[in-house]
Each structure stands twice: as structure tokens, then as C-alpha cells.
Image (cartoon, coloured by chain):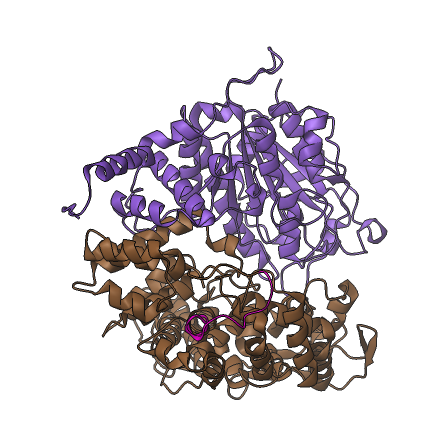
Amino acid sequence: MSENSMSSADVSNVSNVSKANIAVNRFGYGARANELELAKSDPKQWIKSQLQAISFTDNLPDSNEILVEFANYQQQKKQQKKQQNKQLTNQMSMENNDASSIPKVSKLFARKALRDMSANSLQQAINSDHSVSWRLLDFFSNHFSVTANGRLMVGLAATLEREAIAPHLLGNFSDMLLAVEQHPAMLVYLNNEKSFGPNSRMAKKHKKGLNENLAREIMELHTLGVDGGYNQQDVVELAKGITGWSVKKPTKDKGAGFVFRAYGHEPGTRTLLGKRYAPQGMNQGKKMLGDIAKHPATAKHICYKLAHHFVEETPSASLLNKMETTWHRTDGNIKQVMFSLFDADESWQPSAQKFKTPREFVISTYRGLAPKKLNSKVLLNVLTSLGQQPFNAGSPAGYSDEVDDWLGPNALMARIDWATMISGSRGRINSEKIMKLSLGSSVSELTYNAVLRAESRQMSLTLLLMSPEFQRR
Amino acid sequence: MSHVNNNTEAAILSRRKFIKMAGAGLAVLSFPMSSTFAFGADKQKANPKIVWLLLRGALDSMHTIIPSFDPQYKTLRPKLSASFKAPLLPLQQGFFLHPSLKNMHTWYQEKSLLPIVAVSSGYQKRSHFDGQDFLESGKGQIDHDSGWLSRAIDVKNKRALAISRATPISLRGSKNSTKQVSTWYPSKFDSAEHEVYSELAQLYQHDEALKENLENGLEVLGLVGAKNAKTKKRQGKFIDLSKACAKFMVGEQGVDCAMLELGGWDTHNNQSFRLNRQLSELDQGLAALKSGLGDEWQNTVIIIGTEFGRTAKENGTGGTDHGTGSALFLAGGAVNGGKVQGKWPGLKADELFEQRDLMPTTNSFGWIGNILSQHWQFTEQELRQVFPQVKAYNEALVKA
């Protein structure tokens, strides 16, 4: 980098050229086409105007279709088993037990839905002219991480960001929170769809009981944070408050999607974080969530995660202060909180603070290279190999946002191997042009010379993609 | 890359030298000799090795080392206790091992497996992530930059390898991290040409972190050879990681200790089915590790731990929720096994931690500390650098 690192937040003498670089690479997914040029005249305004709503207008299945399909799949499997058993017990009777009442279900439906949706988000992020919005979507998708494990979750996982997160991306956090916790993907993933109050009618009749999983992760991961001041009793109380928040069974209930099963809800008053909640059916849990969303610990937790993701490993107290103040003033409005992040001088330190995650690395690479055609399967395989397969974090905490978890010897070697491979497949590419497009003039002499004097086109592009300037942001 | 156009002869020479070092040679140069320490003459072992296996997600110890003798057990777990598909494998004192752990049970009978019940790292809340960080830090508090295993290898100048994409906390913070701690994980891509590495080494000269990780990555590449087996299977299966781990540990260049991780233990629902599968995967992976270690098995202690236990009572969805007291396993030819260690606290309501979890009666680090002192000859003072909070227990855990 041409500038040396600065210790204070005084960025008044940072040129617009390097500010444009920061806007595009630190906050967005890397430059595409002439974005660096566009950002130059007013980098702050430019990045603000990049925050735009995201909507999905494709024909990919929604969660209701996936739930119905899953129910059909299970019925079909049952039928097949029955038939097999019949044939086994009575080899002679070859009567054709017609299963045509159930729509034929493809074994691959859920896998395909997951692949298509995951790739769709990636492709849109690569081609978007407001990529910071896609970064923000991915941030919250990872914040409310769900893992595609088991046939039902394979189908459902990718619908959460499309149906519960994207619609509230620039709205209030409390709305996003409620939409997420009532979404079938989250309810199934963290086992709340079968969690019933120990004193509910359901529990008495069917011996079903409480499962604390969702309630604990709501407080630990989604809102207050692990040090947010709640205890085990609060976990149980919230778990009871959201008992009965479940998912319709298309074979038994009408339709699909979220349902409140009143007969599974724990009766009585709940006390959460010292506050009492009268029994009000589903609204009891809703009110609890609303209050948790407003809790100062939640503002602290989410603002920290945002600053930690977009700006630096250890965000400064002054930056966090600005964001939290905005959070409280706007009732947790995500767009306004992001604006306060963009407005803060602390966010514009010239030296790169973060190491790109594999997802950021891959997306920014393709934004720079702008291939005419990008095979979705290839794209997903790359992320899998680099350790960040979409919807496969394997933990409700999502993928790590820490440098130490991505910058390891083996992780780096895998990046080098991929950079080499992709550079080898690019033919007559002009690395110098791509360097200019992606990084502008914010390149060290060392990198500039290495890219220009490399012994081959492939080597040149590999070095650019693996340069500190491209790896860090 | 057949043409080497604009390079002077000197550059080519230095590059070749670099490549040579990056290949087989570098490992020899940079790893300090570890076998020349003067221990108590007769106590010295050829090559005492340690494997640290962290089960991420909180293994339900009561479904693994089953306390059938405890009258409360079946009351607390009416469904789970009746869910086993095969006869339980008998241990001492009325404990039984889960039927999926066939190999481990054989080792128990050969006195090479030591289950320890009712342990805890001292972490008292129920967050997976904090619980794991706490167990990996080993300091009685969370330190993301310093793990107990890395402090241990620093004291004795040992070399360690994490079978992981990046360095886990257990192995973070070694004073000499690039020399002594490596990571390895299977990669799908063909390896890049060596020229790329030497060019990048140049490019990273002002970026310490990138430089260190590149050098470290190249060292490991030299150890396993550029391309690992052409497997088309899922990358990162535990049995494959275990096999690779064994490879890194044997031979003259073998590392002194390794860390393995296995996730998937967070069984809030459908626990019976999931643990059948999970425990088989664990058992088979460990068997692969044993066979890969060959003779080194006799010098090895495998420490198997998890961040915390699960509720004593089964929950409403055929599973268990986050708890406290858990179990530790010590396995390996060097282990003085064949019995069940630890003090059973009982399962009556007032014997449970916060009326819900198995009460821990001993500290995991006390047992691990014991292994360090008996297997790696740590003095009390040296041990304090690793576990400042906990004293090692005084049991004979390692074969004399």
C-alpha cells in the first residue's frame, strides 16, 4: 500500500482514490467493471447509495413448496416400504398397489434446490452493481446460520435468507429476528418445531417435552450474546415462551409453513430477564423476542459483529459507540446503523484490516475477471474446497469471521492452488488491466512489478490474486 | 511454465534452492531435534506421543459410558436407556460402554483404554463455543491466542500438527509457531507449481502473517508429498483424517503430537440413532489411527475430550440438552487402562449440578496434567506454565 498505517482516526488526508478503493473492496465484494472510477468523486456517498433492497425474482422453490415436497417424499418412501413388505410376505400376489395418488418425487429435489439457491446468491453477488447489499445479506445469513443437514434441512436451509432475512435487510432488526425465529428453516434446524411445554395438553397426551436449543441460541448467538446477562433460567423461560412455535405438517394440517400449536404451548406467566410476561398464546413469545431485540446487549452484540465484519478485527470503542447510538435512536434500523458505520472516520483507515474469507475471495475474484459464463457447480465446488460451502457451517454460530480461522498454512496453500488453476484457465488475460480495475493505484511497487514481470500470463494473474492487496481488505 | 524468460541465473539458482528446501529438506532444517532431552535415565521413552482429540458439540457421556448401576439412570432416561440396538459392553463397577465402541472395548480389555467419568474443564455455562475455547485454552479463562497444547510443546520443544484448515486454539500462541506447529487438511486442487511458491515468498516479504503461513504450508507439503491420495470420497472424513494423522506421526520425521477434531455431537434430538453413527465413526477412526501408528501405538496416549456434558434427563425430543459434567477417554498402548477412573457423583436431584446436569467431580486438566507429567516428564513447575490453575492428579495413568 502506498500509505502507511495510521494510528488515529484522522483520515482527512486520505485521498479519494484510496477511499474509493476502501469503499469498493472493504465494504463491497470487490470492484467490478468501472466501480473504482464511479466511487472516486464521493466514495462515502457512493457506498451509501449502494445499500439497496434485495429481492429474489426467480422461480426457485420457496419453503412451503419444499415442505410439501418433503411430505410427499416421506409418504412415497412409506408406500414403497409397504409394497416391499407386501411382496416379501406374499410373493404370489402381484397386485399392483397404485401409488399414483402421491405425486412422484425426485430424490434429488432438495439437493437441487439447495444448489440452485446457493449458486443464485453467489452469481447475483458477482454480477451485482450494489455488492455491499449482498455482503450485508450474507452477513445476516451467517449470523442466523442454518446448516443443510438431512433431507429436510437440505431443502430448507437456503430459503431462510431469501424469505426471512432479505425482506428486512434494510429495516429494523426486531422484524428480521421475528421473521427468522418463525421461519420453518430455523424452527426445524434448532428443533423448536417439536418443543412443547411440559404442562401443555400436548405433553400430557403424547409425552412430548421441552427442547431448549432454539431459545439458547436466540440469546447466545442471535441477540444478547454469550455475555449478555442471561442465565439458565432465562433460557428455559424463553424456551417455554416459544413452545408451540412449530411448522405445519402438509399431510395433516392445511398448507405449509409456520404454525402456532396452542395445545403445545406452556401455560402460565413467564419471567425473562426480570420481566414478567402474561400468558397470551403466541404473543407471549413474540413480546419476549421484541424485548430481547431492544435490549442494549443486543445492540452491542450486533454492532460489534457488523464492525468486526466490515471494518476490523478489533473495532474501536468510538466506532461502536457511534453505531450503538444510532441503533438506539432508530430502534435498531439496520440501514441507519450501516450508514453510521460508513460515516465514521474509523471505518476508513487506509491500511487493510481484514483477510478475505473464501467467499469474499472467490466473489471478488470473479467480479474482477468477469467471465462470460460461470458454471454454478464449479463455483460451489470452489467454496467447498476452500472450506466455506454455503449453508454448511455445521454450527448455529455460522462461519468464523476471525482472521486466524481463515489464514492458516493449509488454507493459504489451497487458495494458491485454486488461484493457479483459475489463472491457468483464463487464456489471454491481461493481468495489468485486472489489477487496475480491482485495486486501482493502491498497489505496492512490489506487487506491481511482480504482476508485470511475471514469467507467464498464468503466473501474473496468480500473483495478483494472491497478493496481499487482493487477499486483504 | 516451461519458459524462464527474464530471470538471471542467480535468481534461478536461489529459486531452485528454495524449492529444494520447500520440498523434503526444509522439515529437517527447521524442526529442532526432540529426542535428545535428558530425562530421568530409566524413565525415558523412545518417543512418547500424544494425540489430542476434541469432540466438538458436547458428547453425551451418559450415553457413552452408561451408568446402568445407578438407580436413577433409567428414571431420568426412560427412552434413551431402552434405545440400544445391541448389548452394552461391560466395564468395571457397573458401567457399560456404548455398543458402537467395539474397538475401544477391546482396548479396554487389553488395558489400553481408560474411561474417566464426571469430569469438567471448570467451564460452568452452557455455550458450545465458549466451552470449547475454555477447554482449548486450559487457563481457567478463555484466551483465543494461547492453547494448553501449544504451551506444553513450548516447554518441551516438541513439534505438533493440527489436522485442521487453520490452527485451532489448542495449538495457538506457541512462541515459535511456524517451526513447531503445522496444520494439514486434504485439498482437492492439484498443487501449484513450485515457481508460484517462490514468487509468492518474494511478494510476502513485508506481510509477516502471509509469509509465515506460506512457509509453514510448504513444510507440510514437503512432509506428505505434493499430492495426497487421489480420493474421490468426501474430503475430511474422520477415518481419513485419522489415517493421515498417523502418517504424520510415524517415522523419524514424525511429529510428537497431533490434534484431531470431530464434530456432530450436539444431539438435541434423535440421539440414539445419531450417537450409534457418530460413535462408530469415532471408534473406526481411532482404530485406523492405531493401525497407522503401528509400533508407535505403544508410545502413544490419545486424550479424547469434549467441551461439556449433557442434561442428566432426556429432553422431550429424544435427545439431551447442554449440560456440565462429561467424560474423558485416555487410549493408547502407553495408557495404564482397563478400569474406570473418576468419582461418580450420583444422579439424585440434589446430587446433580443445578439440579439438572451430571456433577463434575474432577477437572479435565488435572488428568491431562497427569499425562504430561508421566508421559512427557513435566515437572510441577513446568506444568504450571501449561495449566496455571490446576494441579495434576496423582494416579498411575501411564504404563511404567
Please tell me which residue lies in front, B309 or A374.
A374
The stretch in magenta equals A7-22
Look at chain B in the picture and name its colour: purple
Please tell me which residue lies in front, B134 or A148.
B134
State left or right for residue B62 relative to residue B201: right
At a point 49% along the width and 34% down the height, the residue shown is: B180
Does the magenta-highlighted stretch encompass residue A14?
yes
Residue B385, position as x, y percentages in the image? 68, 33
> Residue A6: which quarter of the image?
bottom right
Q: Is residue B299 visible?
A: yes
Residue A366, position as x, y percentages in the image? 31, 69
Q: Which quadrant: the N terminus of chain A? A: bottom left
Please tell me which residue lies in front, B94 or B138.
B138
At a point 43% along the width and 66% down the height, the residue shown is: A390
Image vertical order of residue B59 relative to residue A62, above or below:
above
Image vertical order of residue A373 relative to residue A1, above or below:
below
Image vertical order of residue A31 relative to residue A7, above or below:
below
Image vertical order of residue A12 relative to residue B182, above or below:
below
Instruction: In the displayed orientation, state which residue is furthest to the right.
Output: B350
Look at chain A in the picture and name its colour: brown
State left or right for residue B30 relative to residue B363: left
Q: Is residue A306 visible?
A: no
Residue A79, position as x, y percentages in the image? 41, 73
Does the magenta-highlighted stretch encompass residue A148?
no
Instruction: In the displayed orientation, state which residue is furthest to the front.
Output: A13
How many numbered marks are there?
0
Q: Which quadrant: the C terminus of chain A? A: bottom left
At a point 50% along the width and 51% down the height, the residue shown is: B277
